[in-house]
Image: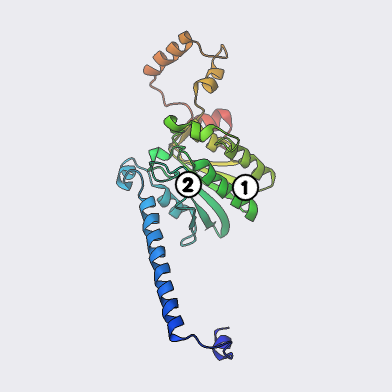
Amino acid sequence: MRQYFQKMKPIGKALSQNEKTQAEASALEISKVDQEIARAVEARKKAGIPAEVVHKRGEKTAWERIDLLVDPGTFLPLNSLYDPEFNQEGTTGVVTGLARISGRHAVVIASDNKVLAGAWIPGQREHVFRAQDMAERLRIPLVWVLNCSGVKLTEQEKVYAGRRSGGRTFFRHAELAEKGIPVIVGMYGTNPAGGGYHAISPAIIFAHEKSNMAVGGGGIVSGMSPKGYFDLEGAETLIEATRKFKEVPPGGVKIHYDKTGFMR
């Protein structure tokens, strides 16, 4: 094709020197914008605690986990600067993009565990919706790299409230699975409450040996009480028992493999 275009007859007239100068100036301005965006994306990747702190915990960052998951050089980050709620953290707390995994295209969502340990923060739900919609539109698997500490409690009304709430992300998982689109989660670290729901709503779960997931919130946990609810006496009993608790916290791989059946 290159040879064809090199030999083809010119169409129209050649650009004047003035037009060439204007085009070069425009290209330079576009280049400046590209560089500005690149700097903003790089700053976004550095949001939260330093990677060295995560490494000291024996963990990897979201970006490092993505690099290990996908085929080399295939990850295309999407919506990197998306922050509809203008969070003080400067991010929505997730990294999303397209990639190939073992040669197959997939949409990837990764919890940014450098930012509030991967917590749900405002705007994250809309970021997740975009990734879920893309998986549905392209009919390719949706793969989570999950390490979510639950909702940021001081702003939970911006996460769970409304018809397009954080809970809708779990409903979307069910819709994708019903349409035959695989929804897969690789789970790391501690994933309580909102993080736990992300873990159980996908169809296929892969769990790191030290990871755990559990429901949270007084209203939900109270359903596990013999009374079916919590009163002051029951809450104080639970608090006192927790102080003396010396076993591994519930929600680990062992309980979900041996008892609940979530992990097989």
Image spot of residue 76 (x, y percent): 49, 59
Could you tell me if residue 139 is visible in this image?
A: no
Q: Which comes before the other along the chain, label 2 or label 1? A: 2
Left or right: 110 as drawn, with respect to 7: left
Point out which mark residue 258 bears.
Answer: none
Q: Residue at x 36, y 47 (%)?
A: 47
Which residue is labeled 2 in the image? 110
Q: Residue at x 53, y 18 (%)?
A: 222
The amino acid marked with disc number 2 is: Ala
Q: Residues within 10 Å of mark 1 (few under 14, many from 20)?
A: many
Of 22 and 41, the residue lying toward us: 22
Residue positioned most to the right: 179
Q: Quadrant of the N terminus?
A: bottom right
**Does residue 66 lie above or below 12 as drawn?**
above
Could you tell me if residue 126 is visible in this image?
A: yes
The amino acid marked with disc number 1 is: Pro
Q: CA distance from mark 2 to mark 1?
A: 16 Å
Circle 1: element type = loop
Image spot of residue 107 (x, y percent): 55, 52
Circle 2: element type = strand
Left or right: 46 as drawn, with respect to 139: left
**Does residue 112 lie above or below 216 as drawn?**
below
Residue positioned most to the top: 233
Query: Mark 2 or 1, which is nearer the eye?
Result: 2
Point out which mark residue 182 bears.
Answer: 1
Of 206 and 153, the residue lying toward us: 153
Q: Quadrant of the C terminus?
A: top right
Here the colouring is rainbow
